[in-house]
Image (cartoon, grey):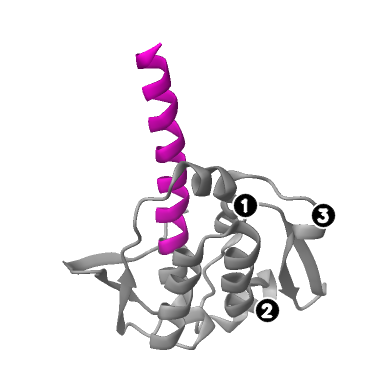
Amino acid sequence: MDAPVRVISEEEGYRLEETQVPDGTMLELKVPILAEPSIELAHKGLREYGFEQRFTITSMSQMGGTNPIWVYSVPEIEASVELVPLIDFDQVQQKGFTYIDLPLLASWLEETVGDHELADGIRELLSQEEAFGKVLPFVKSLLQERVAAYRQCVADVKAEAVSSS
């Protein structure tokens, strides 16, 4: 599912994006524009890591309590980001939600994957908005953009190799 954000404008170094929170107000954040990844970083970003390098997110529900969910790649993390209804407590109680420790995710991206720019981008978003449910659509947008850039970089290198052979 795509992040429910809309790009308002693009400035040097960032995009101004907005999303509507459940109470009807609009929230705007400056989302960093990341440079294209190198082919090495793209491979690391798409790689499935082992058990020792996994990242843990938490599933929380009223009946099931809190349970760890182990994820092994950046695309898997991006796909696991569920947008939390900020006001619909009935839905949260019935369905539960997935919690991701975003500062820890930034550290994991930096230390395990080596994507310092993506890690810094998440930290930049957190410096603008601390509330998990409010910042999450923007983090998802940034992760989606980066995973797409990883895939495009790998596809471009493969296409270049085919055309030169």
Q: Which sits earlier in the primary sequence, circle 1 or circle 2?
A: 1
In the figure, is residue 133 to the left or right of 160? right
Q: Which residue is mark 3?
A: 51
Quadrant in which residue 160 is drawn:
top left
Q: Nearer the viewer, mark 1 or mark 3?
A: 3
Q: Nearer the viewer, mark 1 or mark 2?
A: 1
Q: Amino acid at mark 1?
A: Glu
- The residue shown at (44%, 25%) is 158
Which residues lie in the magenta part?
A: 142-165
Question: Mark 3: few, some, or many residues within 10 Å (few <14, many ≥20)?
Answer: few
- The residue shown at (40%, 54%) is 145
Q: What label does residue 76 carry, if any?
A: 1
Is the residue under label 2 in contact with that under label 1 (CB below 8 Å)? no
> In the image shown, does 15 or 108 lie closer to the viewer?
108
Residue 24 at x, y percent in the picture: 33, 82
SS class, disc 3: helix
